């Protein structure tokens, strides 16, 4: 991995700061790779190269004067196309927003720019960011650089594919159903789902679907923002830049996350939950995770199979119901009214995916309150668990990157251990553990399946202690391996 474009953002920023490479020179390297590789993977779907080149030149001029804009001074990077970047398209993958060009930056984007980043492109997402693959009517389909016939995941699929292929220096994504973690797992990179509520959400809502647009925003339950990168150091660096309260709270409120719990990998007490009879992982993924654990134990890691005192199936049910209710605003009003009419005609014995879905999204506020009550109990049980255990290692999803499938989500199936399983059952349960409890979770690459597909491990940490799973992921790198570029992209 000697190609400069494939190095970590931390290394690249240091090289620019030390004048070993210029911002403009690095940007041109990424543009060259974008022109050469992007047609096959379609990860970067919009660019503003003129503005990026101007800012990169200004960064180099500042460097020559001894000036430093911040930790990301002159670093070229891209932004997921669900986050607003002033002067660049922000479509959310829908033709309704094809011509929408925001006049201001999302809060996280602004933090990165203030730290010196050079934004040169936007990366692909699914329609409204609500799919496990990244394809839409505006920009088409994004392919996984490890296997073009497979998806890089969603909704941060374009971001993960661009990083794995060495088309960008850094990325930022959002996560409600594994949208940061699953693409990181499928593409062999690092990703971090932050603790809920510590990264401002301004500029991340589809503007035509809310009453207030532009300068106004809402906070959607379960949704968080976080970085995707080629190293755990990069994740930690970005988190230190973007963790802030909403702008309107900053006069009185600040956020200071605690440092990592321990200093050395051997000092951590690590919980292990690599499989479960309720949602068993595919053998290819499971074998890779077990080998990673074996290496950790050989390195002296203190591992325990103690799990949180929760019922996995119940936790998954609460999560999925809250997930559907959190995203209900994405359903067009006419469709929602039709669903409400359909509910009355459903047989009580109808347990189909569609029947379950429409019952959930048309349920009462009382039902949401019941779910929220159950969530609070889950959160307390996780807090009890982390009194004794520092982090929990578990799968990201039950499968590795899977073939493209543009049929309706409710009708999709994935093969797990030679059995067809509903797509939602394959992809949601393990990411839901951290999401429903508002916990931070870092994904670290740990190897490849026999089919040469990446596998990541999920490191779940205590509430508000994001730097602990980030630190564990960093320390694991020397034992379990880190980022490896896909064949053909060196």
Image (cartoon, rainbow, N blue to C red):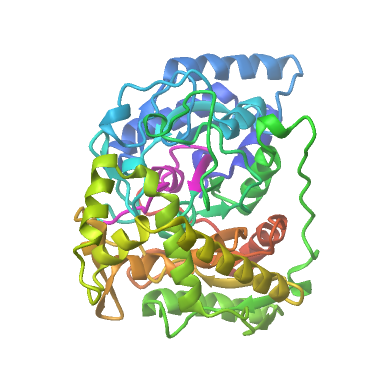
- The answer to whether residue 481 of the structure is visible from this angle is no
Instruction: Count numbered badges in the picture.
Output: 0
Residue 82 higher or lower than 58, as above or below = below
Q: Is residue 358 visible?
A: yes
- x, y percent for residue 487: 37, 54
> Residue 58's quadrant in the figure?
top right
Above-or-below relation of 221 to 201: below
- The answer to if 5 sits in the magenta stretch is no
Q: Is residue 244 left or right of residue 109?
A: right
Magenta stretch bounds: 150-174
Task: Residue at 64% x, 84% y: name it.
Answer: 306
Task: Between residue 161 and residue 321, name the one nearer to us.
Answer: 321
Image point (48%, 60%), residue name: 366
Instruction: Pick the residue in front: 82 or 395.
Output: 82
Where residue 200 sits in the image (x, y, percent)? 61, 38
Q: Nearer the viewer, residue 139 or 189?
A: 139
Q: Position of residue 303 (x, y in %)?
A: 67, 81
Q: Residue 231, image x and y in percent?
A: 59, 51
Say which quarter of the image contains residue 463.
Answer: bottom right
Magenta stretch contains residue 152: yes
């Amino acid at each position: 991995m000697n190609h400069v474009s494939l190095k970590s953002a931390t290394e690249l920023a240091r090289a620019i700061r030390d004048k070993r490479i210029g911002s403009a020179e690095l940007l041109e390297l990424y543009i060259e790779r974008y022109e050469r590789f992007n047609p096959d993977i379609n990860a970067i779907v919009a660019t503003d190269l003129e503005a990026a080149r101007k800012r990169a030149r200004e960064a180099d001029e500042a460097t020559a004067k001894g000036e430093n804009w911040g930790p990301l001074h002159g670093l070229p990077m891209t932004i997921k196309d669900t986050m607003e970047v002033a002067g660049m398209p922000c479509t959310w993958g829908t033709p309704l927003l094809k011509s929408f060009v925001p006049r201001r930056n999302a809060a996280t984007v602004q933090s990165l720019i203030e730290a010196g980043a050079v934004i040169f492109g936007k990366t692909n997402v699914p329609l409204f960011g609500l799919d496990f693959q990244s394809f839409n009517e505006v920009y088409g389909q994004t392919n996984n650089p490890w296997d073009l016939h497979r998806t890089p995941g969603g909704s941060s699929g374009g971001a993960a594919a661009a990083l794995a292929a060495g088309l960008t220096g850094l990325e930022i994504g959002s996560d409600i159903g594994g949208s940061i973690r699953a693409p990181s797992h499928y593409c062999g990179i690092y990703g971090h789902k932050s603790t809920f509520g510590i990264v401002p959400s301004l500029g991340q809502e589809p503007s035509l679907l809310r009453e207030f647009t532009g300068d106004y925003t809402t906070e959607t339950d379960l949704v968080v923002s976080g970085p995707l990168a080629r190293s755990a150091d990069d994740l930690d660096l970005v988190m230190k830049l973007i963790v802030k309260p909403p702008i309107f709270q900053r006069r009185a409120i600040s956020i200071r996350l605690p440092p990592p719990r321990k200093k050395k990998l051997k000092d951590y007490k690590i919980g292990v939950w690599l499989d479960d009879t309720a949602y068993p992982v595919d053998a290819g993924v499971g074998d890779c995770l077990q080998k990673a654990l074996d290496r950790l134990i050989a390195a002296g890691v203190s591992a325990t199979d103690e799990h949180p005192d929760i019922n996995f199936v119940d936790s998954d049910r609460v999560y999925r119901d809250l997930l559907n209710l959190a995203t209900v605003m994405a359903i067009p009003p006419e469709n929602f009214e039709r669903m409400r009419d359909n509910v009355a005609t459903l047989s009580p014995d109808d347990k189909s995916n569609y029947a379950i879905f429409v019952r959930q999204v048309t349920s009462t506020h009382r039902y949401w309150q019941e779910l929220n009550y159950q969530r609070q109990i889950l959160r307390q049980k996780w807090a009890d668990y982390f009194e004794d255990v520092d982090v929990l290692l578990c799968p990201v999803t039950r499968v590795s990157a899977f073939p493209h499938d543009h049929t309706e989500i409710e009708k999709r199936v994935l093969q797990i251990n030679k059995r067809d399983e509903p797509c939602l059952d394959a992809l949601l349960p393990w990411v839901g553990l951290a999401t429903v409890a508002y916990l931070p979770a870092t994904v670290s690459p740990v190897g490849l399946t026999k089919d040469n597909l990446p596998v990541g491990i999920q490191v779940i940490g205590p509430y508000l202690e994001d730097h602990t799973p980030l630190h564990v992921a960093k320390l694991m790198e020397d034992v379990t391996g880190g980022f490896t570029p896909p064949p053909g992209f060196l």
